[in-house]
Amino acid sequence: MLSYLDLSNNAFHGRIPKSFGELINIEYLNLSHNFLSDVIPKSISNLRYLNHLDLSFNKLEGQIPQGRVFSNLTISLLQGSVALCGANQLGFPSCPEIFGTSVSKRNQHFFKYIIPAIDSALVLL
């Protein structure tokens, strides 16, 4: 039974695996000082026994999930990911909303640059 997992300082790239949300008995999870990107999986917020989560100094973006462990986090456990949003009590900005839902920076980029470029190409054709 895995209850302690420290994967800090490993230069991991990519997303946090959604399967981490299946570590039902995990109490301590440290993923700090890597190059993890994209959003924090919401499944992590449902881990019943998780009482320490360190995601600092990664390249995470999007909305910080709510619930369980995220309600007890401090700013130091998320610092270094400047594209996070949604935890005003920790000093992170509110998440932007388009059509009533929060969007990540990738989606903002899509709406801001890609769609206008496609529209322009269609007009030129």
Image (cartoon, rainbow, N blue to C red):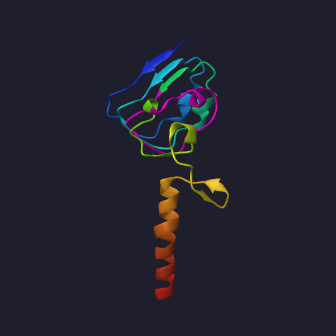
Left or right, 14 with respect to 64, comes to left
Is residue 125 among what the camera can see?
Answer: no
Left or right, 46 with respect to 104, comes to right
Q: Is residue 72 magenta?
A: yes
Is residue 88 among what the camera can see?
Answer: yes
Q: Residue at x 47, y 16 (%)?
A: 4
User: Residue 9's spot in the image, x, y percent?
Assistant: 32, 28
Q: Nearer the viewer, residue 75 or 43?
A: 75
User: Residue 31's spot in the image, x, y percent?
Assistant: 42, 29
Which image quadrant is residue 8 in? Answer: top left
Q: Nearer the viewer, residue 50 or 15?
A: 50
User: Residue 91's spot in the image, x, y percent?
Assistant: 50, 41
User: Residue 102's spot in the image, x, y percent?
Assistant: 60, 52
Seen in the picture, residue 16 relative to 106 is either above or below; the reply is: above
Q: Residue extending furthest right?
A: 100
Q: Residue at x 57, y 31 (%)?
A: 70
Residue segment shown in magenta? 54-75
Q: Is residue 87 magenta?
A: no
Query: Which quarter shows the N terminus?
Result: top right
